Amino acid sequence: METRTTQRVSNLTVCERAIPRKAVDFEAEAQIGDLLILGKIRDFHSQGVFFQPTDMAYVDGEFVDGQNALEALQPGDVVNVYILDSQGNRGIKLEAYIRWMGQSMAHGCAGFGACYDSCQPTEQYAQVAA
């Protein structure tokens, strides 16, 4: 599994965030190597997304609890997040690196923050924002 060295970020409150977020509720899948986590994108911004796992993840051909799947992740892991269309088909693909995992104070749930590959505004951000 490809990884990139990243720094753990502090638990900032919503008011302390330097980059404004857009609250959303997109059905999504996160693919990290052989791990597929079902969930939702809860917010996004010009440099990344917050992904909340739902009930299920798919590992080595078997379904497991989605929240427990977070324990297998590390900052720097490569993640492909797919926004699902209304029929559950993969639509926009967001290529990113996991920046942090844990409890989101803003959303009141566990999940992970992911930074787009370049950590700069990209075309994929423009597609999601449209």
Image: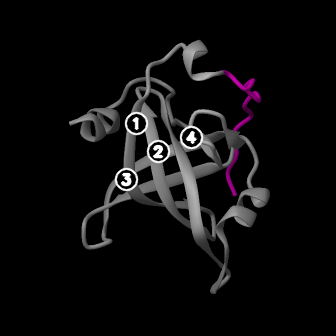
Residue lying farthest to the front in this orientation: 108
Picture residue at 45% right of the left edge, 38% below the top? 43
The label on residue 26 is: 3
Q: Which residues are magenta?
A: 1-12
Q: Which residue is labeled 2 in the image? A: 42
Q: Secondary structure at mark 3?
A: strand
The reply to whether callout 3 and callout 2 are in contact (CB within 8 Å) is no
Could you tell me the amino acid type at mark 2?
Arg
Picture residue at 38% right of the left edge, 49% below the top? 25
Q: Is residue 71 magenta?
A: no
The reply to whether callout 3 and callout 1 are in contact (CB within 8 Å) is no
The reply to whether callout 4 and callout 2 are in contact (CB within 8 Å) is yes
Picture residue at 40% right of the left edge, 36% below the top? 23
Question: Is 2 above or below relative to 16?
Answer: below
Question: Is 54 above or below relative to 124?
Answer: below
Q: Which residue is labeled 4 in the image? A: 107
Q: Quadrant of residue 108?
A: top right
Marks 3 and 1 sit apart, C-alpha to C-alpha, by 10 Å
